[in-house]
Amino acid sequence: MNVLSNSTSGSSASARSTLSVDNPRLFVAAVVLSVVPLWFGRYLPMVDLPGHAAVIAALQEILRGNLTFTTAFEAHWTSPYMLGYALLYAASSVLSPMLAAKVVVSSAVAATSLMSAILLRAAGADERWKWLAIPASYSYAFYWGFVSFIVAVPIALLLLVLTIRFDEAATLKRSMLIALTTIVLFYSHIIAMGFACLISLSYLAAKNHGTLRQLVLRSLPYATPIPLIVIWFASDQMGAADAPIRFGSWISRLTLLLVQPAGFERLSLLAIPITASILVLPPLAGSRLTRSPARWLPVGLCLTIFLAAPSYAYLTGFLYERMGVFLVPLYLLLWDPPPERRENLAWLAMPLVLVWLFANVSRFASFARETQDFDVILKAVPPHKRVGALILNPNTPLFGTPVYLHFTSWYQATQRGIVDFNFAEFRSVLHYRQADSPRITEQLSWYPQLFDWKSHGGKSYDYFVVKGDINVDLAPRLFREHMDSIELVAHSRWWWLYRNKSN
C-alpha cells in the first residue's frame, strides 16, 4: 500500500514538474506555438511587409540585369537597414516571397521571446516570468510590418545580455563582441541600435557609478558605430533635420501602453486583462522587486522614451511606438525570485499565453480566408506589368492597422512587375532614378481619392488595383473623365482590377 502511495505521489510530482513554468522544453514549445498563427494562409497582416518584399524582388532583378528595373531603380547597399533585407533576400532565393517573409518574421518573433528568457537568466531575475514576454513579441512594429526593426529587436536584447556579462568580467573578448554587436545593430536598424546602447550604458552607469574612469573605459565598445553614423547622416539624411516633429495624442500613447504588452494592435476586451496579468502576476506569486538600480534604469528609460519621445521626427514615423516591444522584457527584469515559490499562482502564466494564442489563431485564420479575394485579382494581372494601387479602404475588421495599404506590392514581389506606391520613394535600400517623374506617391497612397490621370502618370500604368467598399464600383470617382481609357478585368468582393486600354 505504501509502495502504491509513493508511486502515485511520485507520478503526481513528475507531472507537476513537467507542466511547471520552470520546464525549459515546455517554454520552447510555447514559443514555437506562438508563431503558428503566422502560417495560416499565404499573407501576413503586416502593413509594410508587401512593400519590403517588393524591394527584395527589385534588388534581385537589378542584380540579374533586368532593364525594366535597372532603368527605374538603383540600389544603395550601405543602408543601415540591410540585415532585415539581407535575410529576406537570402530566404527569397530558395523560397517564394510569401514563405520567405514568414520564415524571417517567425524567426525574429520567436527569437525575441527566447532572448527575453536569456536576459532574465543573465540578470538573475525570476525566470518564471519569461512566459509573460511571449505575447509582447507581437509588437506594434510587427503589425506595421517594420521588418528591419523586428529583426533588430532580439539583437538589441542580446546587447543588454552581453552588457550584463561584460560588467561581471570586462575581458577584451567580451568588449570586442559588444563592439561587433553594435555594428550589426547599426546595419539592422539605427533606432534599435541607439535604444539598445542607451539602456546598456544605463546598466553600466548604475553598476559603476562610483568609478568614472572605469565607466568610461567600459563604455568605449558602444562608441564603435559612431563613424558609420556620421557617414550615413552626412550622405543620406539631407533635409531630415528640417522635417517636422509630431508627438501624437496622449490618448493614443496611453492606449498603446495598455495593449502593446498584450501583443495586440488595438484596444480589446482581451488586451487589458492580459496586460493587467503581466503586471500583477509576479508580485502575486511572491516575486520581490529588485534593489539593484542597474535593473531599474533600463525599464525607467524605456518608459520615459515611450511617454516623452515624438511619434515622428527626422523623416521617420512611429518612433516611440516601436519601443513598446521592450517594455515587458525590461519590466520583468525588476523581479527577483521569491524565497519560497508559489507555483499555484505562477502556472497561470501558461494558460494566459494559451488564451492569447487562441485569439490570434482565430484572427489570422480569418484573415487567410479574407485574402482569397485578393488572389483572384493577383492571378488576373499578367507578369511584368506596371500597376497603380489605389486603396481607398485599406482596413479590415480583423485588425486595427491599415493592413491593405501596400498589399498590391505582392504583385511586384511575385510577378516581377512594378507597383506604385513603391518603397523606392523612401530612399533607403532602393531609390527611384527619376525621383520627380509623375506617379502614385506615398501621399496618394494615403489619399487615393486625389488621383489625377495627368499629374500622377495614369497613362504609364498597364493596370490599376482598387480596393474600396464591397460591390461598389469606385472607378468613376477615381478616373472621372478618363473612364473611357480603362476597362474592368476582374472583381472580387472589395477588390477591383482595371486595365489601361491604351497600353
Image (spheres, grey):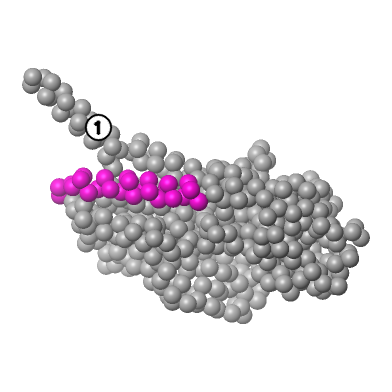
* In the foreground, 118 or 275: 275
Q: Is residue 298 visible?
A: no
Q: Residue at x 66, y 63 (%)?
A: 469
* In the foreground, 245 or 83: 245
Q: Residue at x 20, y 31 (%)?
A: 12
Tell me which amino acid carries mark 1: Ala
Left of 275 or right of it: where is 230?
A: right
- Where's the N terminus, which quadrant? top left
Q: Is residue 356 magenta?
A: yes
Q: Residue at x 59, y 62 (%)?
A: 395
Q: Could you say which quadrant of the image residue 497 lies in? A: bottom right
In the image, residue 232 lies at what x, y percent?
62, 65
Task: Label 1, secondary structure: give it.
Answer: helix
Q: Could you say which quadrant of the image residue 81 lies in? A: bottom right
* In the foreground, 161 or 220: 161
Left of 52 or right of it: where is 224?
A: left
Left of 429 or right of it: where is 128?
A: left
Left of 82 or right of it: where is 185?
A: left
In the image, residue 190 lies at what x, y percent?
54, 62
Q: Main secondary structure of the magenta part?
A: helix
Q: Residue at x 45, y 58 (%)?
A: 264
CA neighbours of label 1 inside 10 A, class few (<14), some (14 to 19), many (20+): few
Q: Residue furthest left?
A: 2
Q: Is residue 350 magenta?
A: yes
Mark 1 lies on residue: 15
Q: Residue furthest front?
A: 471
Q: Which residues are magenta?
A: 339-363
In the image, residue 105 lies at what x, y percent?
54, 48
- Where's the C terminus, which quadrant? bottom right
In the image, residue 125 lies at what x, y percent?
27, 52
Q: Is residue 339 visible?
A: yes
